[in-house]
Image: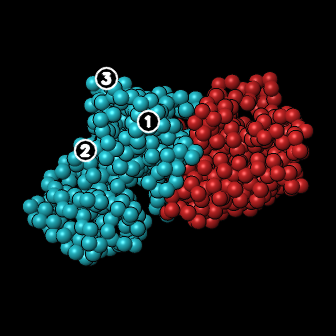
Chain colours: A red, B cyan
Amino acid sequence: MNKVAIGIDIGGTNTAIGLTNREGKVLIKQSIPTPKHGIIELYLDDIVKTMKALINKFTSSEVVGIGIGAPNGNYYDGSIDYAPNLSFKGKVPIVTLLKEKFQNIKKVHLTNDANAAALGEKIYGGAKDFNDFVMFTLGTGIGSGIVVNGNLLYGHSGFAGECGHMLIEPNGRLCGCGVRGHLEAYCSANGIKRTAFELLAQNNNTDSILSNYSLADLNSKIIYNAAKSGDLLAIEVFKLTGYWLGIGLANTIHHLDSQAIFLFGGPLAAGDFIIKPTVESMEKHLLPIYRNKVKIIPSQLNGGDAAILGASSLVWIENN
Amino acid sequence: MNKVAIGIDIGGTNTAIGLTNREGKVLIKQSIPTPKHGIIELYLDDIVKTMKALINKFTSSEVVGIGIGAPNGNYYDGSIDYAPNLSFKGKVPIVTLLKEKFQNIKKVHLTNDANAAALGEKIYGGAKDFNDFVMFTLGTGIGSGIVVNGNLLYGHSGFAGECGHMLIEPNGRLCGCGVRGHLEAYCSANGIKRTAFELLAQNNNTDSILSNYSLADLNSKIIYNAAKSGDLLAIEVFKLTGYWLGIGLANTIHHLDSQAIFLFGGPLAAGDFIIKPTVESMEKHLLPIYRNKVKIIPSQLNGGDAAILGASSLVWIENN
């Protein structure tokens, strides 16, 4: 029988569920709303119903396991812990709950979404040949997943890899977590918008396309399109983003001596507008022993399937 | 027969060699100058002669291995690579060279001095019960050794743990490596002196004891004694040092989710003058999930023996 894995990606708005094979093909997938009612039993019923419907379409395949990616997902105890963007309160023992529903599936694992992205890249994507790398996901915030000696680094309590909350500007911008100066406040999709507004405020560039947008309406795609059309302020936004991201990546490399850094998320669509200044700043801030060695690579996973693939990749890890 | 390990600590000025038992007692030790002549063969003869003299005094003991701590010591290939403070040029294959001289000793291992300090703490000191911790050594520079899942983290090319070179102040003070704003430029013994001078320059505190010292004459012991006697500027120096160090430690914890941070070096003699503001700043800069969990612990090894103990600890690691 063909072996397949189920990947469940729990987001603040939607939950994506899919069946994948070992080669990283998503065979079938479906998305359901992540409810706001906070009643885990009802949500679990929705998930189980969707999973069963998907499995029933692949009866000739053997489901070898379930992998779940979720904000604040803790690998060690299999629970989602106090996730601020989900309506379920406290600790949700999602692994135990799903094991009860699918007693014939032995492997059920959970991790946070950024760790899942890192593992997805290792199992299916561009990191197959790398054993020491870090994945940075640039979205509303910045997540990161650290791979060391071929395995995810979980740390003492399962929360390693919150690199988005490293401080790069003392007393700098307010981060969503309440502390000032974190990388996330500068280089997340949201941080990039803030950089545009900072520059507009400083230089009063009324000739920039970006001067026509509100903070609510602006996004990194608009800034990218402006940069492509030659808008100098938009180009400067990506230069500054790269400057700060390069500092962050250099700090990470000084800790981990990684072989490569993978980058994932909407802002990466800007390509060299963001990659070039990032590499330049990273190299400038590195000790000579690390220079010209560390590869910066955009994620090789299809953006639309990446979350399901990341979650399902937990199933294929041997020692899991 | 009693089992003993040989520890060799290669410093810029002196090389300390000692025999230690598994419990962390230094049975005998001797120091020889680290020569400036750059001829590795002559230096090796000195080391071998000293080692044989020490071993001959413990003929009833079995030497199970040799551990070497050296600046730029690379665990993977057993060579000291381009160490700027040593007179030997290029890559010095110290492990191979020593194995040739002591063919009956199978275990010969090398790592850098900060990694050795971390491992020494794990094998003999205060970190016996910790599997996820980081050692910061505050000396002329700042070294660090990272322990993850009970093992030293070496990274892709053997250079993980250069946390002293993480950037904490963009365009800040010039670090010895040539980059501006690194932690080392603020919180090493040398960085602490620079903080004193920065404050003297800013505030013109002619009433401070420290206003009587040149940069060359000042050291962290003098600043500590001044702080003890109530010198407000000296107290402020440690407060600022703790502020910056706390930022650095928080960045490290956001990467690694460590259980504890150990601190080693001269400035730690200042005790709570430096520890208290460090803890305060670290907690302030951490995500809530890490707060009030991570212990900050001064090294429990005897300062005078720590380098030999750190080096010799490499011998007692099972998978070495």
In this view, B128 is above or below A61: above
Query: Which of marks 2 and 1 precedes in the sequence?
Result: 1
Cα gap from disc 1 to disc 3, whole angstroms: 20 Å
* Residue nearest the viewer, comparing A142 with B273: B273
The amino acid type, in three-letter code, at marker 1 is Ala
Cα gap from disc 3 to disc 2, whole angstroms: 27 Å
Q: Residue at x 55, y 32 (%)?
A: B285
Q: Residue at x 59, y 59 (%)?
A: A283
Residue A112 x %, y %: 66, 41
Describe the element under mark 2 as helix, strand or loop: helix
Q: Quadrant of residue B86?
A: bottom left
* Residue under label 1: B201
* Chain of the residue that carries numbered disc 2 in the rendered image: B
Query: Which of marks 2 and 3 precedes in the sequence?
Result: 3
Q: Quadrant of residue B46?
A: bottom left
Residue A9 x %, y %: 75, 42
- Residue B121 in sight here: no
Q: Nearer the viewer, mark 1 or mark 3?
A: 1
* Residue under label 2: B303
The amino acid type, in three-letter code, at marker 2 is Gly
- Residue A218 in sight here: yes
Q: Nearer the viewer, mark 1 or mark 2?
A: 1
* Residue under label 3: B230
* Chain of the residue that carries numbered disc 1 in the rendered image: B
The amino acid type, in three-letter code, at marker 3 is Gly
CB atoms of marks 1 and 3 within 8 Å: no
Q: How many marks?
A: 3
Describe the element under mark 1 as helix, strand or loop: helix
Q: Callout 2: 10 Å neighbours few (<14), some, many (20+)?
A: few
Quadrant location, the N terminus of chain A: bottom right
Q: Do pointers 1 and 2 mark residues of a single chain?
A: yes
CB atoms of marks 3 and 2 within 8 Å: no
